[in-house]
Image: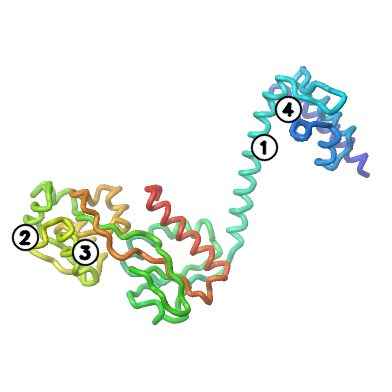
Amino acid sequence: MERKSHVAADALDAAEARAGRGRLPPLNALRAFEAVATQGSFAAAAARLNVTHWAVGKQIRLLEDWFGMPLFERRARGVQLTDEGAALLGDVGGAFDRLAAGAARLRADGGARRVSGTVRVNALASFALCWLIPRLADFQARYPHIDVRLSTTSRKLRYVGEAFDVGVRSGHEDAAGVSSSVLLPDLRLPACSPAVLLRHPIRSTADLRHHALLHSTSTRSAWADWLHEAGAPRLQGARHLHFDHVYLQLGAAVAGLGVALASLPLVEREIAAGRLVCPLPEPAWRGPDYTLVVNTERADDEAVGAFRHWLVDAAAASQSGAA
């Protein structure tokens, strides 16, 4: 049976060689060539490929006939590549490496698509609306069989109990049953609609006195902290507008109601689209980092692990400007 399969393979390679001249050489012959070139002998290549010495020799002869030139110099102890063979090895090795990498990616993607389950995600409302939801389509495309159940609250996750698997919070959480790590730095700068600058340009911190400053309940001290960092702790805006939630504050900034001290991760897409601008490039005040919090009892779940790794990768891409 084995000999018959070799005969069939040889016939196929011969047919490929006849039909494929000018396109691709026989692929089995290329595989044998790469093995001989890296192993240094027909015998070692045969052992690596789990075929006979005769079969390897036949493939090499087929390939040399296809190219019309010798690829090896036969010696008493093994073989040595000709100049043409050495040049071919560089191309063949690179092609096989790319093929192996592509196959690995395809297998990884296939494995991702087989992961199934449910992940309960609890995030700050502003983070969920401005950062997470715009990216969830990517996760769903990668893991179509994982159901994401998203809820929002600002409570400490240790008080949420078992009602979450993965959470995002502002600042570190250290308690029994949860583990946390930095997901994104929360850098903040003044941000406003470009239309606002047409009325009163902002070229320095002092120019903020001509503008309404936008505040949110959960970040009520942010402006004071930033102005202190900017060396203008007593500066007052033309007026102050207050909102219950950060996403309302940022929406007001997009609408041209004033200047918000914006968390850059939350407004990166608005800045990229030109809906918001940051007229003052410094100082970038750092608030409490966005933190990834995991329910340790669910950390080993395959679906939870997939979401956690995706979230970390998405955050890294966001910081590098790729998302």
* Mark positioned earlier in the residue sequence (3 or 4): 4
Report which residue position mark 2 lands on. 238
Residue at the top extreme, as displayed: 68
**Kind of residue indicated by mark 2:** Ala
Name the residue that disc number 1 marks: 96
Q: Is residue 312 left or right of residue 14?
A: left
Marks 1/3: CA distance?
54 Å
Q: Which residue is mark 4?
A: 25
> Of discs 1 and 3, which sits in the foreground?
1
Q: Earlier in the sequence, mark 4 or mark 2?
A: 4
Tag 1, which secondary structure? helix
Q: Quadrant for the N terminus, please.
A: top right
Residue count near mark 1 (Cα–Cα under 10 Å), binned few <14, some 14–19, many ≥20: some
Task: State left or right for residue 155 relative to residue 316.
Answer: left
- Say which amino acid is labelled 1: Phe
Tell me the distance, in whole angstroms, between the alpha carbons under discs 4 and 2.
Answer: 76 Å
